[in-house]
Image (tube, grey):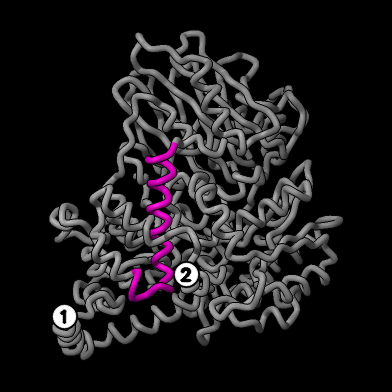
Amino acid sequence: MCGVSGIMYFNRNFFVKKKQIHNMNLILKHRGPDASGIWISKMKNIGLGHTRLSIIDLSKEANQPFVDPTKNYILAFNGEIYNYEEIKKKLINKGYKFKTNNSDTEILLLSYIEWGEKCLNYFRGMFAFALWDEKLQRLWLVRDRLGVKPMYYKIDNNKIIFASEIKAILLDKTYKKEIDERCLFDYLTYCCAPPPKTMFKGIYKIEAGQFLIVEKSGKIKKKKYWDPLQNPVVFNDKKNNFFESIRNELEKSIKLRLVADVKTGIFLSGGIDSSTNAYISAKNSKKIHTFSIGYDKEYASYKSELKYAKKVAEDVNSNHFEKKLSKEDFTNVLEKIIYHQDEPISDPVCIPIYYLSQLATNKNVKVCQVGEGADELFFGYTNWLRTLKIKKILDNYFFKKICIPFLIIFFKVFKIEYKYSYDLLLRAKKNLPIFWSGAEAFTDTEKKKILSEKLKKRYINEDSWKVVKNYYKSFMRKAQNKSFINWMTYVDLKLRLPELLLMRIDKMTMASSLEGRVPFLDYKLVEKMIDLPSNVKLKDNNLKCILKICVNDLLPSFLLKRKKQGFGLPLKDWLKEGLGVSEKKLIISFANETQLLNSKEIENILEKRPDDTRIWFLLNLALWWKVFFKHKSTLYI
């Protein structure tokens, strides 16, 4: 895993300076502490930077930016191509020679030389890369299918500047930092900045499964090269090998993600997802390392899973390590965590992931598998099940025609519009899907209530449906099984997973110079699971029924029968006690100084519901503003 950066000038009067790229490398050093490199073209119109975390082929020959023998193609690559050996055989048959022994970076570059943009069809991995084609005089910026790895960019009349993290782009002295107000409006719903925008006005992110082509003139073309519903595998209930097929695909995915020339490990919670990673990895590796997080005492809002993780570790005979966190551990790293997030990622699980990553790197492990994606693919969320039951009620003809209009009036009269149920009623009345995302923070009514007068006037007639509207159109156009269950999977693969859950993994692991791998999000597995009939994906309200059948012979019964518990932390307890970081003062200060939120309404929330976990969404926003707007963004280099 690595850090990628670069600058490309469109104006011939401007030239890339080595110091510019060096400074970007420096700020990305945590992503790749093992080596760094700079390449600048002869015309000095483009420069690429790279910081390397050496995982496959540790030799100097595999360092980047990587230049082919003809010097016509230059690559700065962040990620892994897990099936590189398979692709290498194809390239050997076509007569290609290699200057490295075993580098997937070289395979990526030679694949582009052979197949052009179509090379992406061959890659099974996670990646974000910048590739300069000297012959065509154009830059290719790519993000992987599921959005496991990020790529940010900023464009003006003179140049494009791009990087694996926003903070490297902020080094551009011509950029004046501003908060994107529309992004903030949507953040209050989705807990993250929906793509392609970021919370920094004028700085964008490439969306999952998309790429940019940037011509030397500055002309830019954006293209989507993959969608979860692009090549769905059609389910055939006459075949008896469906579960065997899913199991084989999952085993292959996990086995591929064991490919490394360094020590690898697994984040182990004691749930089905991480345990599946552990049991399958143990079958394919001599000795695995497992890492678990717990807390200093038992809390009402979160029950420790350490005992389950320990049982699994003993069963697979791993080198097992665990750490118990206190509230002080949480608060001590808050600003550092926010700095590494780049923009507000309102998931407090960032903190335990950061400590897990630190624990792994302290044991000289450089790669860890994580369980993200399993709940989305295999229908594993209890709140999804609850939403599904609510939808059945709302879809009832009598309820829709008689009860909904009455309830909407009732909610308004008694001023309880801030309830999430009120949003669901309004959506049902408008014939919109009631599920917009697996992570929603403030209701539409409450969101507008906490906006400043300036923003309220601007967005009084707006909602955040437009963020997912095009996803819904795409889903209805492409899906064979247009079920509500498949819609929930699809929209979360487009928004919540790439921009919230996967970014918390990328940012927190990379902050510790650790690579996080996501076997449940192998695109071939996604294509097999994305368009299933509802009665196959969910039976008798049994969460993850397909996954449980697939690993029934592998996992012990105590795991398969465990009640669903998400990986988390006792935030409600800690908020009730007070975090000890003057959270109220920070949030009110943000509201007053930015004039974006209504400080009086915010104060009401803070006082009436001190253990409301949505306070974290506001605190995250306020701390981000403090770190990036009031402090220098190089605070933690």
How far across and how far down the image is residue 63, in percent?
68, 26
Residue 89 in picture, x, y percent from top left: 72, 35
Q: Secondary structure at mark 2?
A: helix
Quarter of the image for the N terminus: give it. Answer: top right
Q: Residue at x 59, y 42 (%)?
A: 123
- Is residue 478 shown to the viewer in this render? no
Q: Nearer the viewer, residue 307 or 66?
A: 307
Give how far apart the Cα atoms at labels 2 and 1 are. Answer: 30 Å
Question: Which quadrant is home to the C terminus?
Answer: top right
Q: Does 522 sit above or below residue 129?
A: below
Q: Is residue 614 magenta?
A: yes
- Tell me which corner region of the image, top left, top right, bottom left or bottom right, holds residue 346: bottom left
* Residue type marked 2: Leu
Judge depth for marks 2 and 1 and give the one in front: 2
Residue 540 lies in the magenta stretch: no
Q: Horizontal placement of 591 versus 553: left or right?
A: left
Q: What residue is disc 2 on?
A: 575
Residue 376 image position (x, y, % from top left): 51, 66
Q: Does residue 216 appear to the left or right of 548 in the view shown?
A: left
From the viewer's perspective, tell me whether residue 360 is left or right of residue 521: right
Residue at (76% x, 33% y) in the render: 58
Residue assigned mark 1: 412
What residue is shown at x 68% (from left), y 51% (from top)? 358
Magenta segment boundaries in residue numbering: 606-631
Mark 1 residue type: Lys
- Give the mark, 2 or 1, whose residue is nearer the N terminus: 1
Between residue 159 and residue 519, name the one nearer to us.
Answer: 159
- In this orientation, which residue lies closer to the viewer: 466 or 575? 575
Q: Is residue 344 visible?
A: yes
Q: Is residue 158 above or below residue 108?
A: above
